Image (cartoon, rainbow, N blue to C red):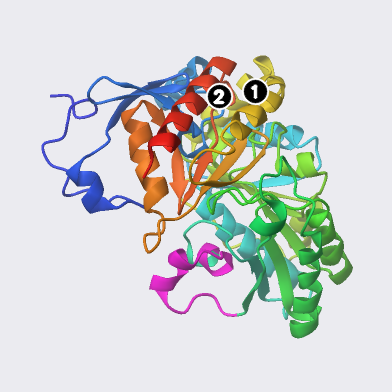
Amino acid sequence: MNASTSRPESLAAFWMPFTNNRDFKASPRLLVSASGVHYRDVDGNQILDGTAGLWCVPCGHAQPKIVAAVREMVGQLDFAPTFQMGHPAAFALAEKLMAYTNHRYGHVFYTNSGSEAVDTALKIALAYHKARGEASRTRFIGRERGYHGVGFGGISVGGIAANRKPYGTLLPGVDHLPHTHNLEKNAFTRGEPEYGAHLADELERIVALHDASTIAAVIVEPVAGSTGVLIPPKGYLKRLREICTKHGILLIFDEVITGFGRMTTPFASDYFDVEPDMMTTAKGLTNGTVPMGAVFTKSFVHDAFMDAPAGIELFHGYTYSGHPLACAASLATLEVFEEEKILDHAQGLQEYWVDAVFSLKGLPHVIDLRCIGLIAGIELASIPGKPGARAYGAFKKAFADGVLIRVTGDIIALSPPLVFEKAHIDELFGKLAKILKELD
């Protein structure tokens, strides 16, 4: 029996993440292979991937160049430590990544996931201010409904109640901006909403409350993804940038979802023309092939550490920081983006994608549609007393009908591989429309 393609004898031992384990194990959905924009399940059914895995496969599955690069590297260098030594691919990738930002950032610190990238960025922010003689700057500002991974730092600055509630006291000294979601004012907006930029000024109130001398950094997702695709109002991010600059506060963009083409630009910072001081990334960084995350920093952040006495400048890192296989996967991913003009293709799909999203307007239960780049959020009215049940029902019906969608609460979130074609968009939304019409 092939353990990777056959139905397991037991599902009991694997405690699955972010999963209704009892429901899943009663009727499992098991994927055994993937190619291009499709998965195949254990019964041989083809599943159209409407979510790029978990927001992380922009170039499509089993991309030949990426597969070949990982295969070659595992036979050449399966592991190399990056504590007090290194390997060429880690440095080559760092240079390529800086070029990918058009050299707007000077340095990259490797992690293994978006969660680790967030905690790394928070630690860098604290150590940066201390290195500059402002050790009083220890406070972080996140945002309601924000998702920044599952480390204790990430859930502390995050603002999703279910992710925080079970774990008691989190990092002290964290405050939160209000979220920008407003159905009454902004429902069915294509792109950036008109209403809500003023909510950025709440940061001034928080600064006045705590004093700027205590605040290390503000962290936000440019587009809040995991909470259900919340798109920033026009001018909102620019205003956050202005306030942070005014008060000497570092601005961190969590681009784990929005980086590497999801907005049809390299990063959301390019799309919105707002430059943070640090960006956290992961997911599309390796096309999802090998786990990897990274923190991009402006040179002034890095250089503050290099004025220290000789020795280790930052006491932080991971066993697998800059893992050879991850570096190989990322180098190949960047080559695929360039050679196959992935961003140009994605930009060419945007208008068709938006029209397809808005073709669902007026269908049963749909109370909002929002989209930007190649992302969409479809918000459904909740069943009284059963929040999340309606969208979860749609998720299960969609899988049975051969399409993979993602749901959070009663919001369907879509983020297809950037190599989707118009026929794939037609199939995805054709099946979704049918499901919504039949949904309880």
The amino acid marked with disc number 2 is Cys
Q: Is 363 placed above or below 173 here?
A: above
How far across and down, in percent of the image, does residue 34 sit? 38, 23
For the question of whether residue 182 can be seen, the reply is: no
The label shown at residue 291 is none
Q: Nearer the viewer, residue 386 or 135?
A: 386
Tell which of 22 and 71 is nearer to you. Answer: 22
Q: Is residue 157 magenta?
A: yes
Circle 2 sits on which residue?
59
Dot 1 amino acid type:
Phe
Disc number at residue 337? Answer: 1
Residue 134 screen position, x and y as percent: 77, 76
Q: Are marks 1 and 2 in contact (CB under 8 Å)?
A: yes
- The image shows residue 398 at horizontal and vertical percentages of 38, 33
Alpha-carbon neighbours of circle 1 within 10 Å: few (<14), some, or many (≥20)? some
- Residue visible at 76% across and 65% down in the picture: 199
How far across and down, in percent of the image, does residue 270 sit?
78, 40
**In the image, residue 226 lies in the stretch drawn in magenta:** no
Q: Residue at x 36, y 25 (%)?
A: 402
Q: Which residues are magenta?
A: 154-172
